[in-house]
């Protein structure tokens, strides 16, 4: 599918997207304008900050690079639901000072994803991180890979996913009005569906509390992620009928966009 059509069709199926490509390179303004043109004003982008900021500079002396990136994303306007600060697994509690200073530079809501084991195994480190995030109203992104690492891999795609994804415990705590969940399933759709059952209770609970969560669904090759994401939304909506329905999708054959 042509690049100037793929996002438009995706946005007819779902109402949020992970902006992973921005981690590798800051796109041209015309590209970002195209993203805005293909999506409605309420569409949500979780925009990942570039690698030089988060992994190379490790949030230190990154003001100029951040401003360049924020300027590039300007055509998205309010579609930037959150600035996604995905940190390397080596970024631990001793660097929380750098995170605290950096978060104050962001123009709006931040969503921070940590992968260092200490934040999941050490209660004191977790509380310190929550304090840093809470001071600026930032969210702690949950990346649930527990199902991915449950048992042996069943395919090359599952093995590759396991080699790249963090193995951390499931965390189901919201710090803000806008919690973010990244859930990773398996090749088998039925296993993926069974694995997300705990999230149904969590997400419906957040909705009833007045929060507005964003849930992203991954599979090892992502071929079935789009229809599975719509199914997850349908299961949540069956429990919370007042939840807005997803848009009616444009027909695609097959529905495997990414």
Image (tube, rainbow, N blue to C red):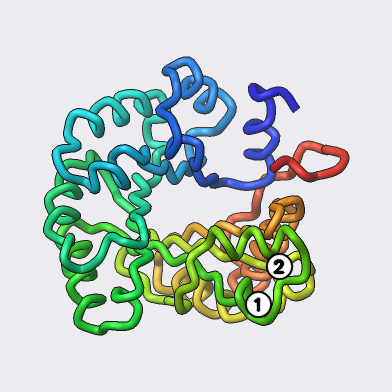
Q: Quadrant of the N terminus?
A: top right
| 36 horizontally vs 102: left or right | right
CB atoms of marks 2 and 1 within 8 Å = yes
The residue furthest right is: 253
Front-most of residues 194 and 208: 194
Tell me residue 10's x, y (percent).
67, 39
State whether residue 180 is above or below residue 68: below
Question: Label 2 vs label 1: CA separation?
Answer: 9 Å
Residue 97 in the image: x percent, y percent?
12, 58
What residue is at 37 percent from the left and 28 percent from the top? 73
Relative side of 142 to 222, left or right: left
Closest to the observer, 247 or 136? 136
Q: Quadrant of the C terminus?
A: top right
Identified at 79% across, 73% down, the residue is 190
N-terminal of the pair, mark 2 or mark 1, is 2
Counting labels gives: 2
- Report which residue position mark 2 lands on: 186
Q: Nearer the viewer, residue 94 or 71?
A: 94
Q: Which mark is residue 103?
A: none
* Disc sitting over residue 195 in the figure: 1
Provide residue 203's location: percent of width, then percent of height: 51, 71
Q: Identify whether 152 is placed above or below 207.
A: below
The residue drawn where x is 33% and y is 50% is 85
Which type of secondary structure does the marked residue at label 2 adopt?
loop
Picture coordinates of residue 234 (x, y %)?
69, 64
Residue 60 lies, with reference to residue 159, above or below; the image says above
């Amino acid at each position: 599918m042509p690049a100037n059509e793929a996002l438009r069709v995706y946005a007819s199926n779902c109402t949020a997207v992970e902006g992973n490509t921005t981690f590798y390179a800051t796109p041209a303004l015309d590209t970002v304008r195209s993203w805005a043109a293909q999506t409605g004003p309420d569409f949500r982008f979780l925009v990942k900050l570039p690698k030089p900021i988060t992994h190379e500079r490790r949030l230190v002396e990154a003001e100029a690079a951040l401003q360049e990136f924020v300027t590039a994303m300007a055509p998205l306007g309010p579609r930037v639901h959150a600035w996604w600060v995905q940190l390397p697994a080596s970024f631990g509690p001793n660097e929380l000072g750098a995170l605290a200073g950096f978060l104050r530079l962001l123009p709006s809501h931040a969503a921070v994803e940590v992968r260092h084991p200490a934040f999941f195994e050490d209660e004191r480190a977790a509380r310190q991180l929550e304090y840093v995030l809470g001071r600026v109203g930032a969210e702690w992104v949950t990346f649930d890979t527990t199902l991915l690492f449950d048992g042996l891999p069943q395919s090359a795609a599952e093995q590759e996913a396991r080699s790249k994804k963090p193995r951390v415990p499931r965390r189901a705590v919201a710090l803000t009005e806008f919690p973010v969940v990244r859930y990773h399933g398996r090749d088998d759709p039925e296993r993926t569906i069974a694995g997300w059952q705990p999230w149904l209770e969590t997400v419906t609970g957040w909705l009833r509390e007045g929060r507005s969560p964003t849930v992203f669904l991954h599979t090892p090759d992502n071929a079935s992620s789009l229809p599975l994401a719509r199914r997850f939304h349908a299961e949540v909506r069956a429990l919370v009928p007042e939840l807005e329905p997803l848009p009616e999708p444009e027909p695609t054959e097959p529905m495997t966009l990414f």
